Image (spheres, helix red, strand yellow):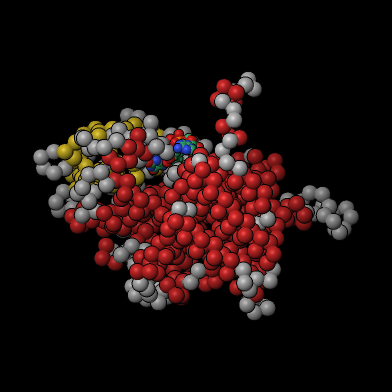
Amino acid sequence: MPDYEAPLSDIRFALEHLVDLAGLSKRPGFEHADPDTVFGLLDEFGRFVGEVLAPLDRIGDTVGSKFDPDTHEVTTPPGWPDAYRKYVDAGWGSVSFPAEHGGGGFPWLVTIAMQEMLTASNMAWSLCPLLTQGAIDMLLHHGSEEQQETYLRRMVSAEWTGTMNLTEPQAGSDVGALTTRATPTDDGTWRISGQKIFITYGEQDMTDNIVHLVLARTPDAPPGTRGISCFIVPKFLVNDDGSLGAHNGVTCIGIEHKMGIHASPTCTLEYDDAVGYLIGGEPNEGMRQMFTMMNTARLSVGLSGLAVGELAYQQALDYAGERHQGRAVGAAAGVSSPIIEHADVRRMLLTMRSTVEAMRGLVYANAEAIDLARHGDDEGARTAASELGDLLTPVTKAWCTDMGTEIASLAVQIHGGMGFIEETGIAQRYRDIRIAAIYEGTNGIQAMDLVGRKLPMRAGGVVSDFLDRLAAAGAELTTGCDEYVAAVDALRDTTTQLLTNAAADPNNALAAATPYLRMFGIVAGGWVMARQAIAAQRLAVDDPQREPKLTTARFYLEQLLPQVHGLRAAATAGSAALFALSPDQLRSTR
Ligand SMILES: Cc1cc2nc3c(=O)[nH]c(=O)nc-3n(C[C@H](O)[C@H](O)[C@H](O)COP(=O)(O)OP(=O)(O)OC[C@H]3O[C@@H](n4cnc5c(N)ncnc54)[C@H](O)[C@@H]3O)c2cc1C
C-alpha cells in the first residue's frame, strides 16, 4: 500500500493563486508569515506527517483503541502516544494561536493547509489535535483571564488535549434536548452530573490531562438551546501552582465499535458531581459561545473530505498504473494495458482530481475569510469577510464531506474487487470518511443552516454579493465559459425561487435544502476552477503546473459543473411530494 505524499505543489498553487497568502502576510501581526517561511513550514510538516503519522494509519485501523472496563482506561494503538510526543515536542499544535499564549501567530489559512496534510496522513489520529484546537478557540474567545491562564498555554502547546461534549443519547442534532445538570456551589465552582456519548478522544493515554468542555443546564435554565451553559471540566483538577490534583468525577464507561476511524476513541463519559468551571462567568451563554468556534470546527471537518479525497486519489492512481486488464484502444495486440489507459478509469481519476482541487480552493477561501474577518483593514472589510465565512461554512462542511465520500467510493471502484478487500487499504478510506457527513452537525443540518440562516443574512444581500463575485470571476475565462455562466445563472435563479417558495411555506425551503446545498457546492467549486484556469493560463508555457491545472479546470467546468441543472428541479419543487405519503403508506412495501 503506498504512503501518503503531501501534495505540496498543489497546496502551494492554491495558496498563491486561489487565495492570497502573500496579501495576508502583509497584514499587521502576520508579517512573519511571509510565503517563503510558510512554504518552508509546510514542507517540514509534510515530512513530519509522512514519516511519523502516515505509517501508523493502518495499524490504527486494524488494532484500534481498546477500553478496559476494570480500569476505565483507553489504550490507543501502538505508536500513537510516541507520535503525539513528537508532535508536541516539535510545537506543531501551536502554529496559528496567539503568541501571548505560546502560539506562533500564523494565519488560520496556514493551519488549514497543515490540517489537510495531518488529516490525510492519519484521519483517526488527527482528530485529537483538531478537537483540542476547537476547545482552544472557545477558551480564547470566552474564557476568563484565570481560565486562560490555567488551561490555554498547555493546550496550545498540545501538552493537554481538549474535547467537546455536546451529545447525549436523547440530544444529537437537537442539542437543546440535553439534560446534563450543573449545580452551583458556595465556592463559585459547579458540580456537573450526566452522561455524554460519542465524545471523541474523551479518554486516551497520550497526555497527562484532558480538558473537557461540557454543555449542561443550570437550575432554572430556560428550556431548549437558550438554557445551555458551557463548563470546563478537567479530567484531573489543576492546583493553584499548576500541578495536577485529584481525578475529577468523570469516568469513561465505554468506547464505540465503529465503521471507521477505529483508532479514535469515541467515548461514553459519565459525569458524577464533577467539578466544573463556568466559561465566561454567565450562565445560558453556551450556545452563543459554541457558535463562535463553529466556523473553524466545521471547516476542519469539511477539510477532511478534501484530505481523504486526496489520499484516495493518490492510492487509486498508483493502483491504476499497476493493474493490467484488457487492451486499451490503440494498444499493441497481445499485451494487456494498465487500467489507467481505459477511458472509464480516466473519467474516474479526472473526476477525483478536479473535485479535490475544487475542494482545496473552497476550503482555503473559507479559511482566508476567517482570517480577514479578524484581521481585515477596517470594520467594513472585516464584516464582509465574516459574512462570506458564515455563508461558505455549511457548504464547505457538507459539500466537501459528501464529495470526500464519493471520491473514496470511486477509489474503491478503481481497485475493482480488490477495493472490497481490506488488504489494499482503500476500503479504509471509505469507512473512515463516512462519518464526516454526520458529525459536527449532519449534512442535512448544514443544508438547513444554509437556507434557513445564511441565505436570509442581510435580507439576501450576502448571497447576492457572493453570486456577483462568482459572475465577475468568469469575465476572463476562455475555457468552459458558457458552462460557467449558465451554472452561476442557474444558482442565482434557484436562490431567488427558493426564497420565494420559503416565504410561502418554510417546509419548502427545508425540502429543498440538500439539493440546493449540492448545487451551491458544485457552483462554488466551479468558481474555484474558473480562477484556477485563469491563473494557469498566465503561467509560463513550460511551467509543469500549467497543463494539468488547465486540464482539470476544463474537465470540471465542462463535464462536472453542468450537473447543477439536474438539481434545479429538486431545489425548487417544494415539499408537497415529500409529504404526499403518510408514514404508513411509506411502510406499505412490506
Ligand atoms: C465517531 C463519532 C464522533 C463524534 N464525536 C463527537 C464529539 O466529540 N462530541 C460530541 O458532542 N458529539 C460527537 N458526536 C456526535 C455527533 O455530533 C452526532 O452523532 C450528530 O450530531 C448527529 O446526532 P445523532 O447521532 O443523534 O443523529 P440524529 O440527530 O438522531 O439524526 C438522525 C437523522 O435525522 C436527521 N435530522 C435530525 N433532526 C433533523 C431536523 N430537525 N430536520 C431534518 N433532519 C433532521 C439528521 O440529519 C440525520 O440524518 C460524534 C459521533 C460519532 C459517530
Residue 88: x and y, percent? 35, 57
Q: In the rendered image, is residue 288 in sight?
A: yes
Residue 264: x and y, percent? 43, 43
From the viewer's perspective, is residue 96 above or below residue 499? below
Residue at 56%, 32% in the rendered image: 579
Q: Quadrant of residue 378?
A: bottom left
* Nearer to us in this view, 500 or 582: 500
Q: In this view, which residue lies farthest toward the front? A: 504
* Nearer to us in this view, 34 or 318: 34
Q: Is residue 226 left or right of residue 563?
A: left
Q: In this view, which residue lies farthest toward the bottom? A: 540
Residue 367: x and y, percent? 45, 62
Q: In this view, which residue lies farthest toward the right? A: 333
Name the quadrant where ligand 1 sits.
top left
Total marks placed:
0
Q: Is residue 213 left or right of residue 304?
A: left
Q: Is residue 257 left or right of residue 313?
A: left
Q: Is residue 585 left or right of residue 328?
A: left
* Nearer to us in this view, 85 or 577: 577
- Quarter of the figure that contains the C terminus: top right
Residue at 40%, 69% in the rendered image: 381
Residue 153: x and y, percent? 26, 58
Q: In the rendered image, is residue 61 in sight?
A: no
